[in-house]
């Protein structure tokens, strides 16, 4: 009789499909520098962060947290393997885009990005102004 394998087939297929959605743990890549920008109140703004990725880290993305007068940019990468086999320094040095809505109140906002390589923060400034020229630049 062959009824045993027919019942096991849906279970095996379910396990295979479930494994397709698994993600690797995330790590913060090192940070080299962050832009300072001028933007209009309430406008979409994209600030760039120059990161220093290890060989085990996938493409970095950016999460943004605006709290009062501080804007925190959090670059993250999936890391599917251990970094112990990576050479020292950066394997990749891409510039990633962090897009968010500028605060609606004019003023200067501190932009901070944690750099795990130095256990410190890199900083920039977002100037929100209705009249100043729009620009972004690395220091």
Image (cartoon, rainbow, N blue to C red):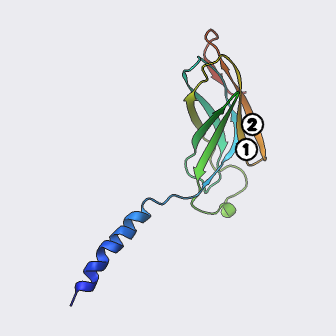
Q: Which quadrant is home to the C terminus? A: top right
Sequence-wise, which precedes: disc 1 or disc 2?
1
Q: On the image, which quarter does residue 56 sit in? A: bottom right
Question: Taking 36 as reference, is 54 above or below it?
Answer: below
Q: In whole angstroms, how far apart are the C-alphas of marks 1 and 2?
A: 7 Å
The reply, left or right, for residue 87 in relation to residue 13 is: right
Q: On the image, which quarter does residue 106 sit in? A: top right
Residue placed under numbered mark 2 in the picture: 122
Residue at 65% over, 53% down: 54
Residue at 76% over, 39% down: 121
Q: Where is residue 134 shown, x and y percent of the image?
A: 60, 16
Residue placed under numbered mark 1 in the picture: 115
Q: Where is residue 66 shown, x and y percent of the image?
A: 64, 32
Residue at 65% over, 42% down: 51
Q: Which quadrant is home to the N terminus? A: bottom left
Question: Taking 22 as reference, is 105 above or below it?
Answer: above
Q: On the image, which quarter does residue 74 sit in? A: top right
Element under disc 2: strand
Residue lying at the far left in this picture: please name it. 1
Q: Where is residue 89 shown, x and y percent of the image?
A: 72, 51
């Amino acid at each position: 009789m062959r009824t045993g394998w027919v019942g096991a087939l849906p279970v095996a297929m379910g396990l295979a499909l479930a494994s397709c959605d698994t993600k690797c743990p995330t790590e913060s890549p090192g940070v080299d520098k962050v832009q300072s920008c001028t933007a209009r109140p309430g406008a979409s703004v994209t600030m760039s962060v120059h990161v220093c990725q290890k060989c085990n880290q996938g493409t970095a993305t950016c999460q943004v947290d605006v709290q009062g007068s501080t804007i925190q940019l959090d670059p993250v990468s999936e890391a599917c393997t251990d970094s112990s086999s990576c050479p020292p320094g950066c394997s990749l040095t891409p510039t990633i885009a962090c897009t968010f809505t500028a605060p609606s109140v004019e003023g200067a906002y501190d932009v901070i990005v944690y750099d795990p390589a130095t256990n410190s923060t890199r900083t920039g400034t977002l100037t929100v102004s209705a009249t100043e020229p729009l620009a972004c630049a690395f220091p």
